[in-house]
């Protein structure tokens, strides 16, 4: 026989309404009481009736997240941490992989919008007008990794981190530096390209070269190795860690030492960067902080949808490791 909320209430000497609110994560119940109720419910084997709960509250008790690629460390890492935050509040997380295209993002959102109370968009690439049209009338929406005035956004301060990465390479004596770009439709790619151009304008003695290959995969990075050698570059900043790690492998396959002959830096600070030798120098944004801020904003909007949209910017920090070193003589 299944355990009911009424039985949990009787065990604790609380009203059934208090137990129901506690199990739903309501702030009307103190944190201590919520923890006490959850512990008792778990010990008694209580399982909520999701359908009945949704009908009673007029909510799905689910949130959604659209990610560009679940196989990538960034998307999977953020989704995992949002799942932890959702589970702690008694919410389900619905995940949709957009395939990294604007059309895929809008299709994924259409699917999630009918099943979720709120949606997180992770690094959306759809044109702004299309994205705004798709989400019109649906709230809460929180956009992660892109600034869209009038919508709730959580993103990193990329400019200072980009300058820090290039400053680091220049300080090591590198004067011919390549930039391995990401997808042209990516908002982050547009910001970083602008940042690289601005850095080049401010440092005319440094040759900054955009590589012909672009993308997010290790295969793309490996394919760029021959171009790096042909152009005589001594350092490369890659769009993300996957392409950076692929580039390291491609260079080694050509007999090029990293960092003895070519220094390589990435972006995102995914777990593999701290494991695969040489450990990768990379720009780090705490995925814990990013997921916490994004999920927290979404839950705040679920509690009070009338809040004014806000933009939260988090710091990004350069992590110097073993893949960058002095420029070769």
Image: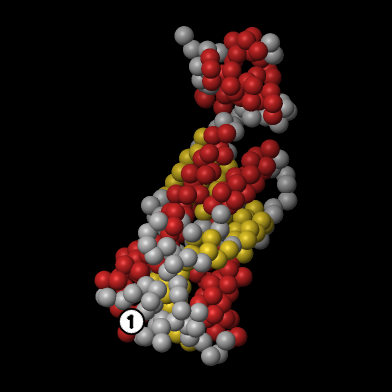
How many residues crowd mark 1 within 10 Å: few (<14), some (14–19), many (20+)?
A: some
Picture coordinates of residue 136 (x, y %)? 60, 51
| Viewer can see residue 17 | yes
- The residue that label 1 is drawn on is 229
The residue drawn where x is 54% and y is 80% is 171
Under circle 1, the secondary element is helix
| Above-or-below relation of 316 to 31 | below
Picture coordinates of residue 93 (x, y %)? 50, 38
Picture mark count: 1
User: In the image as oriented, which residue stretches furthest toward the bottom?
Assistant: 205
Picture coordinates of residue 63 (x, y %)? 54, 40
| Above-or-below relation of 4 to 267 | above
Picture coordinates of residue 115 (x, y %)? 50, 37
Q: Residue 130 versus residue 178: which sits nearer the camera? A: 178
| Viewer can see residue 133 | no
Q: Is residue 22 left or right of residue 130?
A: right
The residue drawn where x is 50% and y is 16% is 45
The residue drawn where x is 56% and y is 49% is 288
| Above-or-below relation of 310 to 59 | below
The residue drawn where x is 53% and y is 39% is 84
Quadrant assignment, res 315? bottom right
Question: Quadrant where the C terminus lies?
Answer: bottom left
| Above-or-below relation of 326 to 282 | below
Q: Residue 197 versus residue 320: which sits nearer the camera? A: 320
Q: How is the image coloured?
A: secondary structure
């Amino acid at each position: 026989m299944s355990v009911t909320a009424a039985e949990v209430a009787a065990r604790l000497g609380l009203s059934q309404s208090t137990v129901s609110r506690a199990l739903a994560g309501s702030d009307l119940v103190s944190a201590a009481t919520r923890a006490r109720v959850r512990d008792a419910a778990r010990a008694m084997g209580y399982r909520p009736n999701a359908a009945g709960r949704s009908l009673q509250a007029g909510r799905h008790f689910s949130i959604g997240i659209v990610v560009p690629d679940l196989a990538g460390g960034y998307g999977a890492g953020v989704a995992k941490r949002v799942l932890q935050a959702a589970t702690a509040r008694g919410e389900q997380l619905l995940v949709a992989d957009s395939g990294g295209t604007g059309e895929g993002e809008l299709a994924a959102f259409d699917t999630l919008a009918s099943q979720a109370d709120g949606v997180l968009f992770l690094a959306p690439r759809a044109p702004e007008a299309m994205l705004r049209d798709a989400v019109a009338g649906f709230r809460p929406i929180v956009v992660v990794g892109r600034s869209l005035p009038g919508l709730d956004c959580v993103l990193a301060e990329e400019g200072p981190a980009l300058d820090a990465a290039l400053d680091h390479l220049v300080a090591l004596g590198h004067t011919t530096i390549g930039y391995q770009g990401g997808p042209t439709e990516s908002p982050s790619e547009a910001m970083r390209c602008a940042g690289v151009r601005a850095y080049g304008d401010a440092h005319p003695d440094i040759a900054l070269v955009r590589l012909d290959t672009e993308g997010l995969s290790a295969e793309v990075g490996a394919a760029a190795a021959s171009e790096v050698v042909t152009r005589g570059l001594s350092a490369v900043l890659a769009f993300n860690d996957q392409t950076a790690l692929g580039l390291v492998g491609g260079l080694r396959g050509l007999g090029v030492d990293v960092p003895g002959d070519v220094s390589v830096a990435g972006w995102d600070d995914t777990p593999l960067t701290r494991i695969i030798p040489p450990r990768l120098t990379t720009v780090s944004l705490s995925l814990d902080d990013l997921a916490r801020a994004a999920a927290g904003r979404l839950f705040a909007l679920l509690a009070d949808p009338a809040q004014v949209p806000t933009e939260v910017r988090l710091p990004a920090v350069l992590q110097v490791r073993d893949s960058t070193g002095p420029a070769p003589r």
